[in-house]
Amino acid sequence: MGNLNEDSEFWDGFWKKNSLDEINEYSWPQVSKAYGLKRILDYFDGDIRGLSVLECGCGSAEVSKKLLVKGAKCDLLDISKVGLERTTQQIREMGYEVNSFLGDVNCIEGLTGNKKYDLIYSGGLLHHIKDLGPAVDSMKNSLTKNGVIIADIIPKKFSLQTIADFEKSFIYFLRNIYNRDFSNIFSMHTHIPKTFVSERLPKEYEETFKQYDLSAEVYTATIYPSFALPKFLEKIYSRILISKYSFWKSLYIRESRLLNLLSISFTLYAKRKSYE
Ligand SMILES: C[S@@+](CC[C@H](N)C(=O)[O-])C[C@H]1O[C@@H](n2cnc3c(N)ncnc32)[C@H](O)[C@@H]1O
């Protein structure tokens, strides 16, 4: 990424504003995290007891919290002191021990003392990293022999979400009129923060990982868009999505044109080539 201090300041501000206590279990972001967890469990055939995991860019570490309960040993890494301290505290209150590393994903070895992991997971991190190579190299160096990198990524590209963003913008427009807030009345609401999300497409991620002697495959993750819905409808929508996991799973796509067209977010799996 660009300037490390600026980035950590930005994310500290982000985690100060976003209280973890406000996370609503039945919301679009929670559905996508629940599916992130399911994809990890699928990969390990449901048995993750004793698995050593590093969650990079953990934020509120929703996925690690669930993995810990299922018997994995999780460490956390994040560039935001505010987010990391709060999440670590929450996990300790849940009765689990975690090692927490404050720093950049491109220098994992230095932070962890060269510890190796069976799974390096990141959700919503890699599209914030401008120079992906050093981060990929660092993740690779921190993998066990058969370890795997699983990453959930949202690229800035056209998708069903682009269409859903018109609905969101219209609802926010009406809300602003109702609240007599005319300052940003015509601004387009985009699901994805403009300044921070890279435009790398799935294939480009695969190519970067392959340059580091890793096999890499990218699949669709989220095809269903996020709308601006009243709370009760958001709850119904999320419940339906959660109950239809096997349907969405049957639509896993790798073929790059369809993948580029349909996917709002996607999941990347990478392993060392030499050990395959
Ligand atoms: C969009 S949030 C995702 C948080 C969480 N994984 C989730 O799915 O809710 C991105 C997280 O990555 C962290 N982050 C951003 N750049 C980073 C970097 N270069 N190294 C490590 N963490 C970083 C941020 O502090 C933030 O917590």
Image (cartoon, rainbow, N blue to C red):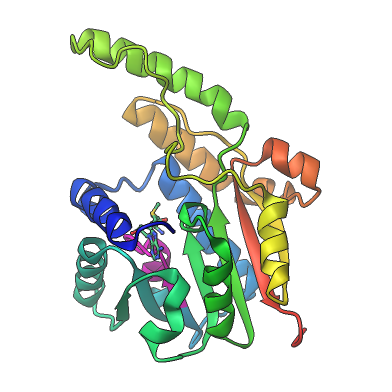
Does residue 70 show up? no
Whether 61 is drawn above or below 130: the answer is below
Query: How far from the left and from the top, in percent, is residue 218?
Result: 70, 57
Q: Nearer the viewer, residue 162 or 175?
A: 162
Q: Residue at x 47, y 79 (%)?
A: 53
> Which quarter of the frame holds ligand 1?
bottom left
Residue 218 versus residue 240: which sits nearer the camera?
218
Viewer-proximal residue among 237 and 204: 204
Residue 186: image quadrant is top left
Q: Which residues are magenta?
A: 54-66
Q: Position of residue 228 (x, y in %)?
A: 40, 26
Q: How many marks?
A: 0
Residue 13 is one of the magenta-drawn residues? no
Residue drawn at 55 percent across, 31 percent down:
161
Left or right of 48? Residue 111 is: left
Q: Residue at x 56, y 84 (%)?
A: 141
Q: Which quarter of the rendering shows the N terminus? A: bottom left
Which residue extends farthest front?
A: 3
The part of the image, by quadrant, that contains residue 168 is top left
The C terminus is located in which quarter? bottom right
Relative depth, front residue between 246 and 101: 101
**On screen, residue 135 above or below 140:** above
The x, y position of residue 233, in whole percent, is 40, 28
Name the side, left or right, on which 191 lies relative to 215.
left
Whether residue 120 is visible here, answered yes or no, is: yes
